[in-house]
Image (cartoon, helix red, strand yellow):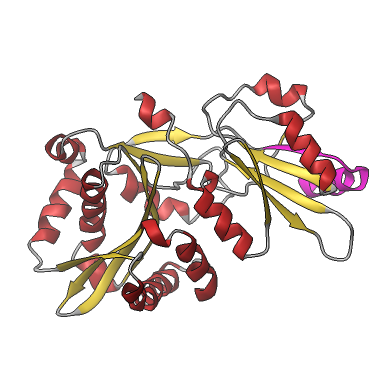
Amino acid sequence: MKDHIVRAIDARQTSQWARYMESIGWKTETIGSTHLFIKKLPFIDASLMKIQHPQGPFPFERIDEISRKYKTIWTILEPHMLGYEESEFRKYGYRKSRMLQVHTATIKIDLKKSKKDMFNSFSENAKRNIKKAQKQNLEIRTIFMKEKKNWKYFPVFYSLLRNLSKMKKFYIYSYYEYQKRMMAFKDTSVLIFAYENDAPIAVVWYAYFSNVIAYFQTGITKRGYETLANYLLVWEGLKLGKKLKLSVFDFESIYDERFPKNVPQYKKYTEFKKRFHGELILYPTPWIKIYNLWAKLFYLWGTIL
């Protein structure tokens, strides 16, 4: 696997994600380039902490200091594979956990390839469907959300996302939470729409940071599927990443066979993402450190159920 793909950071370790977390009520602390998220528990003088896909070396001693500061009952640390050493986690009192707070697997595509080589690397199915979509007379609109006037497109995006959630029967966050998330990334968020006869039929929300462009969320109608617009919008996102001189495209999440009970609906779109033949990334399993006896008993009881 190419070094720039291995070293690519996750969105949850960006300053933009930290702003989003603060906007929904989490406290953030930063140790070097590692962002920690702390949530005060109601009714008691205690909190929870989560650290999502930080790259090693991991600042375990500083994490303990901050945990004491906020009276954390436990910390969930879901590491990036870069700099990961299982023995270090055990040394500092962590144990493996099945409490997943973030996706554990993704697919990343190398944008350093030429467009021709990248396209040729796709599955025959993906190449054929992109070509078919290009013949559907669809209008592609690329909307940069850093421009205030373009926020009129946010309700259109959310409407398509909500339509997809109804078709596929999965939960989505509220309009206002998505609005806060996109606002945190507003300077680097791009909505790529497919329109047919001036009607929106599909969209993908992309955000970019460091050397990465991330496939954050999609929305689509039945007609969007019929025209294969979903394939075309991935291709448009890949070309946008190259145009912005980025080097990694991150699909953000896929189904992980190590955790079959976790969001099983991921199965439905993992095959779609795999057709673009990127690099499979399996993040290390989550780790937990429990600081409180009652929290330990509660956690152990939950793992039995």
Q: Is residue 247 left or right of residue 106?
A: left
Give residue 2's quadrant in the image.
top left
Q: Position of residue 172 (x, y in %)?
A: 51, 67
- Residue at point 25%, 75% (across, down): 200
The number of numbered discs placed on residues in the rendered structure image is: 0
Q: Is residue 235 left or right of residue 62?
A: left
Query: Is residue 263 at least partly visible in the picture?
Result: no
- Residue at point 44%, 30% (across, down): 7
Residue 45 drawn above or below residue 183? above
Q: Is residue 291 magenta?
A: yes
Q: Is residue 290 magenta?
A: yes
Q: Is residue 247 left or right of residue 298?
A: left
Q: Position of residue 88 (x, y in %)?
A: 69, 22
Camera-nearest residue between 256 and 291: 291
- Residue at point 67%, 64% (across, down): 25
Q: Position of residue 261 (x, y in %)?
A: 59, 49
Camera-nearest residue between 25 and 170: 25
Query: Is residue 25 at least partly visible in the picture?
Result: yes
Q: Is residue 188 left or right of residue 83?
A: left
- Residue at point 86%, 49% (across, down): 298
Q: Main secondary structure of the magenta part?
A: helix
Specify the segment rendered in magenta. Answer: 287-305
